[in-house]
Image (cartoon, rainbow, N blue to C red):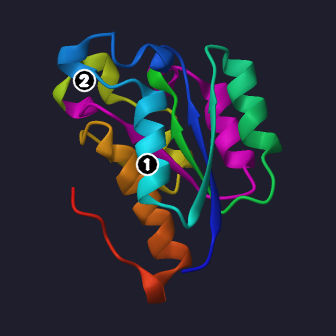
Amino acid sequence: MSHIRLLIVNGVNLNCLGTREVNVYGHVSFDDYLAGLRDRYPMVSLEYVQSEEVGTLAETITTARNLQGIVLNAGAYTHTSVVLADAVRAARCPVVEVHISNLFGREQYRRNSVLSSACAGFISGFGLKSYDLAVESFLMLYCREDVKLIEV
């Protein structure tokens, strides 16, 4: 399987995974999860950026180069940030929107994403495995002849 480069971009409050609303988001920190994700996908170079600042997130997305894709979990900015939606539209590669919880099973205001129409795809509700599914989607796009799906 050919080597591909993906960037995971996490937004506001996702630095608190493992301690924040564990009934919704679980007990695992993203750093711990990312280490396992990298182990599961050695053929994928997984870069990672997390920020609380919408401007930093937008700049990260629009200036990213030489990537096959971006996995974006914007957190609460999902529901409010036209700036991020415009950044996704300006991205030089496909962006897959990811959410840990099922947005459509939560509060009404969380059921709207201003990002979705700009993204190539949307994955929601599979816990941290949503990130695995996003990586798998890029593998299917770029390495069709050699794809082996993970067991979720």
Give the magenta part as a residue range: 76-104
- The x, y position of residue 12, in whole percent, is 53, 16
**Quadrant location of the N terminus in the rendered image:** bottom right
Q: Give the amino acid at mark 1.
A: Leu
Establish if 137 lies above or below 22.
below
Q: Nearer the viewer, residue 58 or 83?
A: 58
Q: Is residue 84 magenta?
A: yes
User: Which picture quadrant has residue 127?
Assistant: top left
- Residue at 81% from the left image edge and 53% from the top image edge: 65
**Quadrant location of the C terminus in the rendered image:** bottom left
- Residue at 82% from the left image edge and 42% from the top image edge: 63
- The x, y position of residue 105, in whole percent, is 17, 29
- Relative horizontal placement of residue 68, taking residue 92 as reference (left or right): left
Q: Give the labeled residue for mark 1.
A: 37
Q: Give the labeled residue for mark 2.
A: 26
Mark 1–mark 2 distance (CA, rounded to whole Å)? 16 Å
